[in-house]
């Protein structure tokens, strides 16, 4: 039994990580989402590990405990709070655990491959690369394979990645070495959208050498054109010590990308019909996210939602350099999706258009007209 017949899955890559024969690869399918492929079926021993760790092949979650505590939270350092996309809790958790001898498996944007990917950070300077939301699907395999199960790690990822990863470490009886953190996930857009967007942006900026999402300097997307790649030690100095800053011009024009993403037009198939991780459904020790809603609507500095699903997670939250304010879960999770979106005709249209030569702006305009027509027809009924 193996993942040979599993397609359009979560693309978490844990099956490729666990395969002792290294015969499973994770590649993009025609829709622009990761899925597994077996490169030499004859070498498969039918050990079943790849299916055992696969969240997609199981109906329930690998962790069944409910929310223990929920908080509004933010870093006690204003520089961290300013740089991060919300309250900086994710960064503070990483920094705290690194100080305790942990390594962090987080996500950074690889400029050479134009993709988000998991990597191992062993210092705070290396951790800085993971700051900020990344609204594209991450490639996990290299990062996950670099993990030594005998060492201690904080693992961050989407809820489906974390659910599979917990199955993986439980299989090898090493859960105690790991802290798992996910986030309120809207879903992941097709890489066809991101690739098209990058090509259009680079016509204006030249080659992008630094990318971040939703930082408080420039908004949702920030592409920076520089003569050399970012020195992350300098970035750490800027963030923590206030010693340096970037002086290069920046381009922020993420409207079309985020319009298509947030309109649920081009998410992965499983984000519609197989997602089981919305709202309070998590296999992580800690879930973080933006704290939307009325309670902190006037706060401009950034506030994170932080939810502990295990005693371990709650203990670690209280050890990091953050302010934690107790709130009922419905306050902390206000504005978050309670269930997966429905797949409609607009998804099929979007995926078809993304494969054409049409620009993202043109596609966005098409959807604006399309939605107006749908609204008009609905009103006419």
Image: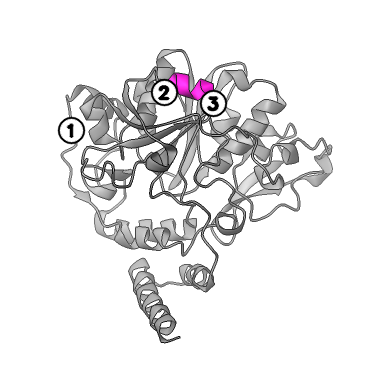
| Element assignment for label 2 | helix
Mark 2–mark 1 distance (CA, rounded to whole Å): 30 Å
The residue where tag 2 is placed is 317
Instruction: Say whether residue 110 is magenta.
Output: no
Residue 126 in view (yes/no): no
Q: Which callout, 2 or 1, points at the residue further toward the start of the chain?
A: 1
The label shown at residue 265 is none
The residue where tag 3 is placed is 310
Q: Say which quadrant the C terminus sits in.
A: bottom left
The residue segment tinted magenta is: 311-316
Q: Nearer the viewer, residue 54 or 20?
A: 54
Q: Are marks 1 and 3 in contact (CB under 8 Å)?
A: no
Residue plotted at (39% across, 19% down): 318
- Number of other residues with Cα within 10 Å of mark 2, as a class: few under 14, some 14 to 19, many 20 or more: many
Q: Quadrant of residue 227?
A: top left
Q: Which callout, 3 or 2, points at the residue further toward the start of the chain?
A: 3
């Amino acid at each position: 039994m193996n993942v040979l017949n599993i397609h359009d899955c979560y693309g978490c890559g844990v099956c490729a990580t666990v395969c002792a024969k290294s015969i499973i690869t994770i590649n993009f399918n025609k829709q622009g989402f990761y899925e597994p492929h077996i490169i030499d079926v004859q070498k498969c021993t039918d050990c079943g590990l790849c299916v055992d760790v696969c969240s997609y092949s199981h109906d329930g979650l690998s962790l069944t405990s409910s929310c223990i505590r929920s908080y509004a939270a933010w870093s006690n350092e204003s520089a961290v709070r300013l740089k991060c996309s919300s309250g900086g809790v994710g960064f503070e958790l990483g920094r705290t655990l690194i100080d305790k001898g942990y390594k962090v498996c987080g996500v950074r944007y690889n400029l050479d491959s134009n993709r988000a990917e998991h990597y191992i950070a062993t210092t705070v300077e290396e951790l800085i690369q993971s700051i900020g939301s990344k609204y594209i699907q991450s490639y996990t395999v290299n990062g996950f394979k670099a993990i030594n199960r005998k060492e201690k790690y904080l693992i961050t990822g989407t809820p489906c990645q974390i659910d599979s990863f917990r199955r993986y470490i439980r299989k090898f009886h090493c859960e105690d070495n790991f802290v798992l953190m996910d986030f309120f996930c809207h879903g992941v857009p097709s890489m066809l959208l991101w690739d098209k967007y990058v090509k259009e942006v680079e016509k204006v900026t030249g080659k992008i050498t630094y990318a971040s999402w939703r930082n408080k300097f420039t908004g949702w997307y920030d592409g920076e054109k520089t003569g050399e790649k970012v020195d992350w030690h300098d970035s750490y100095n800027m963030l923590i010590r206030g010693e340096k800053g970037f002086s290069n011009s920046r381009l922020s024009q993420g409207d079309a990308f985020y319009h298509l993403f947030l309109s649920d037009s081009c998410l992965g198939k499983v984000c519609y019909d197989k997602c089981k991780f919305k709202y309070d459904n998590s296999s992580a020790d800690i879930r973080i996210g933006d704290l939307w809603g009325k309670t902190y609507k006037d706060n401009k500095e950034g506030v994170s939602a932080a939810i502990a699903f295990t005693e371990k997670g709650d203990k670690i939250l209280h050890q990091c350099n953050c302010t934690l304010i107790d709130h009922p879960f419905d306050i902390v999770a206000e504005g978050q999706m309670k269930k997966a979106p429905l797949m409609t005709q607009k998804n099929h249209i979007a995926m078809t258009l993304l494969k054409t030569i049409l620009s993202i702006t043109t596609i966005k305009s098409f959807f604006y007209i399309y939605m107006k027509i749908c609204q008009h027809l609905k009103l006419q009924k």
